[in-house]
Amino acid sequence: MKICVLNGSPKGMESVTMQYVRFLELANPGHTFTTENIGQRIAAIEANEEEYKKVIASIDAADAILFATPVYFMLVPAQLKRFIELLFSHNARPSFFNKFAASITTSIHFFDHTANEYLHAIAEDLGMHWAGSFMAGMNDLLGEDCQEQLLRFGEEFFWLAEKKPQLQRTYPPLRPVNREYQSAGIPMPLDCGDKKIVILTDAGPGTNLERMTGRLASLFGRSASIVPLDDLKMKGGCLGCCACAFDNTCVYTDGFCEEWETSVLSADIIILAGTVKDRYFSAEFKQVFDRSFYRGHVPVMTGKTVGILAQGPYSWCSTLREVLHAEIALQGAALAGTVTDEEEISFATDGRIDALALRCLHLAKSGCVPPAGFPVIAGMKIFRDAIWSEMRPFFRADHAYYRAHGLYDFPQNDYSRRIKTTLFGILLAIPQVRTQVRKDMKQNIVRPLQEALKTSRVLRRHADQTRAGRE
């Protein structure tokens, strides 16, 4: 059987992920593996039609496709994302149709599921059947348990590719958006006070997104700046070299970091205005996210407000929504809302853009950043543990930030709580105590919270401020 490996890493064969692929190759000498280093060669593939055709020829000759890629910013690297866009723009679906595909990703298990879900959906959009994902930690291959599981994963993949059972599709096809949005007029600017707003956009001329961005910018008046992605001066995508880990200095000297700091991170309100291409924003937007990694694993938008404008079938792209919402929360910012061009009536879209502007300003002035939910809390614990253990010698800037801001909140270091928990466990071993605790369980759970309501200084301060305002 012939397997075409689409390698998304910009490091080519020196990629960690490719060592997992090499393991499968060594374990299965009866199969032929052909690797196309997409991430490393994307500039040539995009610029030279012959280079693109060479890759397609490998795909045509293959019986099955294996995506092998690291996880960058909750998805595949921008280089592989750009190649996927080329596949759709060049109508390459016949080369993939009815073949089986699988993925191998490596990461620290931070949102690797979204990267694999994206590849799964893309494979189905290309007419393929999905055989599954192998989501590995960076160094899992060092252990025999991982090696055994990888062997079984490969066996399952090859068996499916050979037998070709008819599997049900998981992700429904995207519904194209063909409606034209036209604003009803130029709105009056809102009172933005001293708030600075930046609208980061990849809108093309004459598009719905350009018109939506124009209306939103008009609402913010002179307080807003529209920053096309081209203005960020990127000469290439993230190389995955992690040289920035020591002191937040990127190996590129193209000016992106300076522009990101001065044009984007200095704003109080950040609007992401993106075009949906396949099942994510454009590869250019993904490249911006990847390159922003020079700031490491620290929240750099704490207290800011973020809004989203989207052109295309945004509501059908669950992975895109999950990634954006989680990233905004991880950065310490508040999501004000999303407006797309999927509404049939332009007047309704106008109203939603106006509402987004109002809410952005209200959130920015109030400072409201709601508590994060499970994905963010779990993600921060992954960062915390990884940086403290194996990543600390390299990610020194992250380590210094985590230590200074109390993010090393390991529960085993809370000795007071450990002692109380141990003593309580001993008491609960006494049948009479356990019976009484079970009887009073509901009251015991809420009692500390009820006491907090009675003694809250925040409530008293708020009441005083409300009373003073009325007077």
Image (cartoon, grey):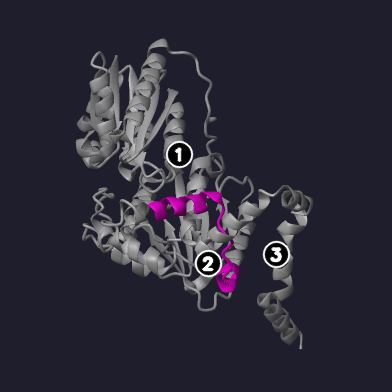
Read off the residue under disc 3. Answer: 448
Q: Which residue is mark 1?
A: 113
Q: Is residue 111 above or below residue 298?
A: above
Which one is earlier in the sequence, the residue at label 3 or at label 1? 1
Residue closest to the far bottom: 471
Q: Is residue 47 visible?
A: no
Report if the CB atoms under discs 1 and 2 are less than 8 Å apart: no
| x and y percentages locating residue 360 in the rendered image | 57, 65
Camera-side mark, 1 or 2: 1
Q: Which residue is located at x 26 percent, y 57 percent? A: 393
For image coordinates 74% across by 63% down, the residue present is 447
Residue stretch in magenta? 362-385
Q: Which residue is mark 2?
A: 218
CA distance separating discs 3 and 1? 38 Å
Mark 1 neighbour density, 10 Å: few (under 14) some (14–19) many (20 or more):
some
Label 2 amino acid? Answer: Ser
